[in-house]
Image: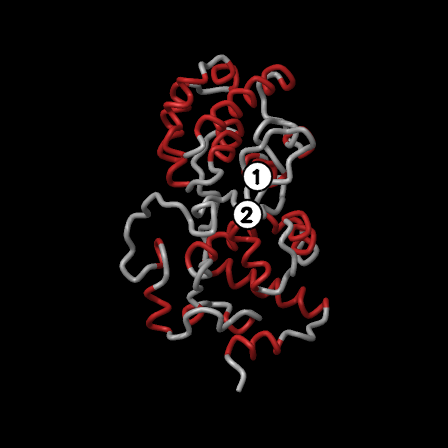
Amino acid sequence: MLSVAEKSARRFAKETPLGRTRRARKIHRILAEVYPNARCELDFETPFQLLVATVLSAQTTDIRVNSVTPGLFAAFPDAEGLAAARIEDVEQLIRSTGFYRSKAKNIVRLAGELVDRFGGEVPANQKDLVSLPGTGVKTANVVLGNAFDIPGLTVDTHLGRLARRMGFTTHEDPAKVEADVVALFPKKDLTLLSHRMIFHGRRICHSRRPACGACPIAKLCPSFGIGELDPAKAERMLRFEMAPRAEPEQPRVDAESDGDAGPGIAEQPAAGASDPEVRA
């Protein structure tokens, strides 16, 4: 007798490319209704702040980054200030984010290159962004999509996991995941699609055991049944504002490596670039 998960996988096994596209877009419409306030969860006021915050988010949570950036940007509000900073001073300000020595060096170098090459401004194109220390394709897409309104897909840990579970891709490599997912959606939707899938991954479709019994896209998911099916038990697994008794989010490291940080799957850095976000 087939399990629920096996039945779900079999149901979509012979799906046509057109069928997959239609299903993917229907999933996105549902996610848009479920997460109307989905957004970048890193706090920022300028493209420079978002770029630095995204680099700092490697191997930690957005909550943790948001706890240190006010102090960091109060001390060094722009690229010129951070470029002139003492590494030791920056290390102390970002220490709680983990890998703080490497991150401090990278964001100071990054600021220096912004000053030397771009007049202190963050470039609004991927080619220049990925040439900066600590910055890869994923970080570039975060900055372009959220600071410059240039649509792009952020393939972090959550989005990559969900794309595979939803049958949008079979790949692990972020570049291949991006190519497969981008082919299914209008370009204008990519930034919000990223946020909505990341929200869903953090709140319902967990890494170790998804809350399948409480999932709004269960009927459209080839992986339905791999997690908790009992609705009551699944509801108790929901996180953040969707939890039955919502509690303040606590800084923690995600079991899959990036602790719910927007940037999660390893970056694809430009050749020769030093990128602390690259990880297993």
Name the quarter where the C terminus is drawn.
top right
Cα distance between the residues tagged 1 and 2: 11 Å
User: Mark 2 highlights which residue?
Assistant: 156
**What is the crowding at mark 1: few (fewer than 14 residues within 10 Å), some, or many (at least 20)?**
some
Report x, y in % for residue 35: 45, 56
**Image coloring type:** secondary structure
Q: Quadrant of residue 94?
A: top left
Dot 1: element: loop
Q: Residue at the far bottom: name it.
A: 1
Report x, y in % for residue 62: 42, 41
Q: Nearer the viewer, residue 116 or 134?
A: 134
Report x, y in % for residue 47: 53, 30
**What is the crowding at mark 2: few (fewer than 14 residues within 10 Å), some, or many (at least 20)?**
many
Residue drawn 49% across and 12% down? 84
Q: Is residue 70 left or right of residue 109?
A: left
Report x, y in % for residue 160: 57, 54
- Mark with earlier residue (1, 2): 2
Residue drawn 44% across and 64% down? 210
Q: Amino acid at mark 1?
A: Val
277 up-or-down from 155: above or below: above
Q: Is residue 227 left or right of residue 24?
A: left
Q: Residue at the far right: name it.
A: 17
User: Mark 1 highlights which residue?
Assistant: 278
Task: Give the label, 1 or 2, closer to the camera.
Answer: 1
Residue drawn 37% across and 61% down? 238
Dot 2: element: loop
Q: Residue at the far front: name it.
A: 280
96 up-or-down from 245: above or below: above
199 up-or-down from 225: above or below: above
Q: Amino acid at mark 2?
A: Asp
236 up-or-down from 116: above or below: below
Q: Quadrant of residue 230?
A: bottom left
